[in-house]
Amino acid sequence: MGWGPVQPGLESLHSTILLTNVEQMDKMQKDLTKSLGRIPYAPYPNSQAKLRDSSSGTSSSLSENIYRGTKRKYPLIKQKGFYSDVLTPGASDLLGDVCAGPSVNRDLLRQADLEEHTPKVTTFEFPENFGSYLDQQMIGPTTEILVKSDFPLQAFKPKVQIPFQGLPGQCPRKIEIERRRRLYLKLDIAQLLANEGIDSNQLMPRHQDPDSLPTIEQKQDPVFPIYLPLKIFDDEEYDCRTPEEWISLGLDLGSQDRNPIPGKALLPTDDILGHEDPKSHQLIYDWVSVGVLDYDKETKFYLVHKTDERGLVRNEEGRPILNGGVTPAGRAPLMPCQYWVPRVHLLFLAEDPRVFVQRVVSANNLRKKTQALLRYNLYVDCMPVDGLRSIEDKSLGRMKQLAMSTPHLRKEKCVLNRLHCLEKEVSLDYERTMNKIIFDRVVTSKPQMFSYVTLPEKEEEKVPEKGLVQVPDYPFNEQRADFIFVSLLTRPEVIHALSQVRDECNKAAAMSLFHSTLSKHGRLEEFEQIQTQTFTQVQMFLKDTWINTLKIAVKSCLREIGKGWYNLAQSNWGVYQMSKLHKLMELIKFNLQDSVRYLVQKSLVSFTQLLLDASCSVLNCLEDMEWGDDLINSPYKPRKNPLFVVDLILDSSGVHFSTPLEVFETSIVSLFDKGILATHTIPQLEKFVLENMFIRGMPLLESVGLHEPAVEELRKTIQFAIRKALIPLQAYARQYEKHLELNNNDMQSFLKEYQVQCPSAQEVRQIVNMHLSEKEKLDNALPSCIVIGPFHVSIEGVKQNLSKKRKALATSMLDILAKNLRLQVDSICEAYKVISRKMYEKPNSIEELAELREWMKGVPGQLHVQEELISKVVEDYEVMEEFLYNLTQDDFNEKWAASYWPLKIANQTEMIQQQHLEDEEKFHKIQLMDQNNFMERLDGLQLLVAGFSIHVDITRAHEIANEARRVKKQLKESQEMALLYNNRERIFGMPVTNYDKLSRMVKDFQPYWDLWTTASDWIRWSESWMNDPLSAIEAEQLEKSVNESFKTMHKCVKQFKDVPACQDVAVEIRGRIEEFRPYIPLIQGLRNPGMRNRHWEMLSKEIKISIKPKANLTFARCLEMKLLDHIESIAKIAEIAGKEYAIENALDKMENEWVSIMFNVLPYKNTDTFILKSPDEASQLLDDHIVMTQSMSFSPYKKPFEDRMNTWENKLKMTQDVLEEWLTCQRSWLYLEPIFSSEDINRQLPVESKRYQTMNRAWRTIMKNANENPKVISLCPEPRLLENLRKCNKLLDLVQKGLSEYLETKRGAFPRFYFLSDDELLEILSQTKDPTAVQPHLRKCFENIARLLFQEDLQITHMYSAEGEEVKLFSPIYPTGNVEDWLLEVEKSMKASVRDNIERSIGIYPHTPRPTWVLQWPGQVTIAGCQTFWTKEVSEALEAGDLSTRLFPQLSAQLSDLVALVRGKLSKMQRAVLSALIVIEVHAKDVAAKLIEENVMSVNDFEWISQLRYYWTRGDLYIRAVNAEFIYGYEYLGNSGRLVITPLTDRCYLTLTGALHLKFGGAPAGPAGTGKTETTKDLGKALAIQTVVFNCSDQLDFMAMGKFFKGLASSGAWACFDEFNRIDIEVLSVVAQQITTIQKAQQQRVDRFMFEGTEIPLVPSCAVFITMNPGYAGRTELPDNLKALFRPVAMMVPDYSMIAEISLYSFGFNEAKVLAKKITTTFKLSSEQLSTQDHYDFGMRAVKTVISAAGNLKRENPTMNEELICLRAIRDVNVPKFLQDDLKLFNGCRWFCDKVYPTV
């Protein structure tokens, strides 16, 4: 079965018929082969012939769509070759009986191909020069494509309607395609059109010349010119492909690029005139070979390109044109050979030219007909109507009557008003109709005269000739028999069964798998339960009830039919397959499957719609959306009801919801899939109906697949909706993060500070009011619930919790205040009780009474203090009453008790004063009685003292001495009583009694007391010394007692001149003492504490008397042994013993001191080990003891202790060595421990890490021992410990060396690391997994990048300055790899970002209002852009000569606009931009004024070229000064301020830029405060180069400087060495050589150079500047070789007034000039009038501080008096540092205000 070409427009119909026929044929083959037991087409089990056109696959046939919809897996049908349909061996078997003809035994075919029939021949010998044979061989025509073409092969293939797998005998598809292709290429379109009588050149409309129009008599064809384009009349039904399919023919398999499609187009031969005037008479149109490039859907035109002489489609550069010539930049302008043409002017080579000719002919004929009808109507319209018969009034009236038949119209005024117009229209139409009838009659009557007129075709109704319509013969009976044979609808039972099946299917289809009409929202779990329950019920119904009902219905309908086509008892599968019952069951199965599919699809759509309705308002939410401040009203309401209830929860983990948000998507998608899967378990009906038939397994009905495109699309829609719904939900939750602290922190954390120190009541009032107002805000700002898309969010719990917490905090504060007030009340009451108790104390003497009275004088003061406290407490209690706080009963009672105390104390005071008067009288009487008794006692004592003169008996010395002691005691007591009585007399106001008698008595008794107590003591001592054992005598005490006794007796001898008896006693005792005194040296020698056995033996040997320190050896015995004769020997030996004893004592003392010296061992962080806490005490003691031991080693008396001393000294020295090594090791370990705790460092330094781990194990062992035994002297003197520590230090040295080399490599990779210390760099490198760890160190690496913005995926997108300015990076960066690598990328992106911003800002500057423009860009970009345009405008004005007339007023106006802007309401960032810009703009204006003043007329004048000028050229920003040119550095400077540019600054810039141009450095020198460093830094800002300021000191060495210079040279930064001449002269010499190396490399313009033995890169922009304060103490004179490297700049004190004026101007002050003068005058007067102090500073720094303070005040108080602002700023800045005396002068003197601020 085959099909030929089809007519246009019938393709879809043919496809449907084709598919139906193929399915019927396949069905018949299945039935037939099953009955025969064979399966035809074995490789293709489904036997469905797939149809596909010959295009590139963009259009698919209906069958493919069906198959694609069912998602079945079919084997691929390989495309055959042109002649591959020739029958192969075994084809008849494969085809079965379908192919008519004799059967052939496949074993007899192609026997010649078998091996046994192959001739036996020798191996072919391959000639050596085979290539030359091939070259010489001449080849005839070939099928190889030898001509190069730009068209793909499939673009030539015609479209045919032939199956891919045809039946035998049919023409194979590919052969037909090839035949038609060749045929189409042979046909000439122009000739075909000519055959139809059409001249291709005449198809295009042309311009008509009114003077040379052809006449009718000329009888040209066409008679009238063509003026309508052909495209209007094109019939698209002729097209066999859609435009998209035609264009897609240019796509090659595996290629993304689209090639041109070959064709022929009707185009002009002259391309130039063809584009200028397509309707020109001079143009000739012909069918030209073209390549079709593109198609425009709007105009329906094709873009064609004429092929060149080689048949290629190339652009102007000779390259193939791909993708229609569209590039990422857009479509290029049309080439002369390119045209946009309509489809009727374009013939594709892959379409049939004959059909296309019919298309053109049809269009042309329709155009002719249309033009003729237009002319016809024109003729009729031009006919006059005068004299014609008009419509009758009767007819017109009838029309009006019919038109106005309804009552409403008759009453409508507007209708009546328009009725007249309608009458005119009807009359005019009637007249035109009359003219048309006349015109038709005239033309018809004279056809030859009016041959050029075409009348409209009349559609006449045909009257039938006969009464009956003739019907052709038709074989009705045969057709009816055939229909009955194949149709199922011939038995009423079957029709009834199908009807019942249809009813059941409709019931199933009407169900829903999901409950999509929810009227109430609930939890996700409830939603899941409802939906699961719904589709489970449907599943059970379909599996059981539905199938069972269907089974009963089918069986009951077909039961009565019996055997035949519908035999339910059939058991033979083959017979069943051929029966109509099989077809019926298949039809029922498809009906069931269709119903199930409809059920699933409808359910999925309704389920999806349910979610979309709930989420409709959130589908446009952006990922980074913010909710806003309104937490009550939701802009995201659902279309119906929300679906899910979620509770907002605040806890320690943050803000989240009761149901995790990520669960929603997975849960809902799971429900979606489970609903589909619920229909995958429905059994087929066949097994239940045919009970006698064996059917294996349980065949199931096919349902919708999980991954069908429509299902995937719905699933994605649901996922999209849920994800979008979560965005506002999460944004809403983020608004509650500010409440987390309140929610999560317990009450104690809030109240801790107040509990420690209770605030005042007023503060408590503020705090409580704050909490209550916050509670009210929470109550008003937070809703109980809110609906956000599909979510009903419950916030009641959070709201109540926060509200309760605020209320609790307020109550707790009042509790704290109440507790504090109770303490105060208790304290007050206690104070009153103390006063009361003190007042009630009973005085026991007049002294106590006087003291009590004196105390009571201070009671009113105390009471006043307490009364003030009471009043304050009462006021504080009033605060609590404001809040209706309920005091406890005890607090209430105590409060009022305290209030009652003052009255109570006043009453007590009166009573106590009366009592005191009575007590005073009583004590006065007692005083008189006591004094009388005392006088009698004194008389008795006088007699006792006088009686001592008669005592002279020495034998009674002990008795008399005891009596003297008793009398002495009585005299002392009498003295005390006399003092007491005198004091009381003063208290009573009585005359003071004189007790001189008592004093004389004491003085007279003293000699007697001395005499007898000394005599008694001496007698006792002498007896003891002589008779007690010698070992009991203390030599030192003995000598002291003898000397004191002798002095006392000698004094007594003198005192008793008048009492001879007593004097004799004194003389006798003195004599005894003198007799004993010579024995003292002997006793001291024998009782020396250093005397040891060796000394006693030495003594015995020396004096030849055996003497040993035994218990029976007394001093009397020693005298008997006449040891006094050997006193010199004894003293000598005693001296030796004493010296040795001192050494022994010192050693013992040192050892004892070390016993208590312990190491202070502390745990170190989380390292599980310990460290020593600064053993300063041990070190100090160690030093002292080593010095002491060494000094003792030189003593001549060291011999007995020499070994001990040496051992001790060695022990101390080893301890010192161990301690020194230990501390060194600990310092290094503490430095390296955090470094090597990082996995990143360990990974990057494996060798050093291994060494460190080895050392670390030893260190931990050492510290463990130290913790267990912290005694220094027992732990340290250990040789193994010293050796271990030395090994550890060696390892640490190696580790530090490797670490330094590693850091050097990192700095080499990112030179800005040279500006970081080792510790800072290691902190970065040890956290490479955390890129954000670099944030704290960015300011040292970059000029003004304070931090970077890291996204959630760590992508770096923005940079922030220290001022908070945000700039988006030109290209976002992912911080992957080494930190130095991505920091290098950050540096590049930073510079690219600044450059891009500058370029874009300069681009839009001319088109944007300047006040708007300056606020749109970062501060640095704004200044650079303004400077660039200022340079351009000044240059243009100098060339035009209108600098003073045009530009200067413009600059003044621009500056005024900026000042007005800065006075307005701006953000902090915008104000900073404008302040810096105004400073620059003021200078720009001053430069212009100076140019006008100097009458500068040329752009080459020095006054102009000496300025810093900015030029945007060659794609970069350049800065020029005189003959120097610098490229802008693009270093991000942030939004920092700029230096006020004075004439001195200009000169400094000029010198420094000249030095940079010559590759030298700059050396500004001058006093402090002249702006040396600031000017250098500001020049760096002007050139956008990183400037590193380095404060020099005499501690710098050449290695540190070398490292710094490496960083400068490698990064291209500037360095400003402040106070450079502080560095030592030796270091400066090396520094000179280092700077020389860099400058020579710059002058040679090399990329890399050798610096101190290392090759490093050179960035030419690097430079070195130095500043110096000449003549200061401690400054070094620079060496000559260093001076030569810098250009000196002498800096002087700048014009403070000018700087202050511009600075104030930039802050928006109106009277900047006047105020600046006043501020500088103030500091001048202060420096003259006030005292001279070191901390006083009235220079530029002070002026800048005051201006900054004034600027801040101006922002806060914009309407405040400006003079008052400045005065306040001066006071705020200066008053804190003034001395008291100067402050009085500053505040009190009238000169200050009178001279400076007379108006304030």
Image (cartoon, rainbow, N blue to C red):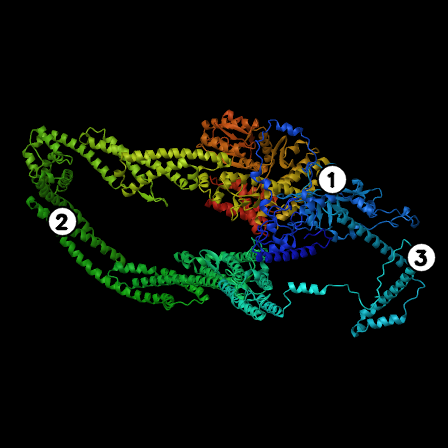
The residue lying toward the viewer, choosing from 681 and 219, is 681
Precedes in sequence: disc 3 or disc 1? 1
Quadrant in the picture for residue 1210: top left
Rate crowding at label 1 as few (under 14), some (14 to 19) or many (20 or more) other CA atoms within 10 Å.
many
Task: Indicate the amino acid at tag 1.
Answer: Thr
Is 723 positioned to the left or the right of 860 in the image?
right
How far is the residue under mark 2 from the one under mark 1? 151 Å
Element marked by disc 3: loop
Precedes in sequence: disc 2 or disc 1? 1
Q: Which residue is mark 1?
A: 307
Determine the residue positioned at 75% across, 52% down. 238
Q: Is residue 1257 visible?
A: yes
Q: Which residue is mark 3?
A: 446
At which x and y percent is residue 255? Answer: 63, 43
Element marked by disc 2: helix
Determine the residue positioned at 90% across, 61% down. 435
At which x and y percent is residue 219? Answer: 91, 49
Precedes in sequence: disc 2 or disc 3? 3
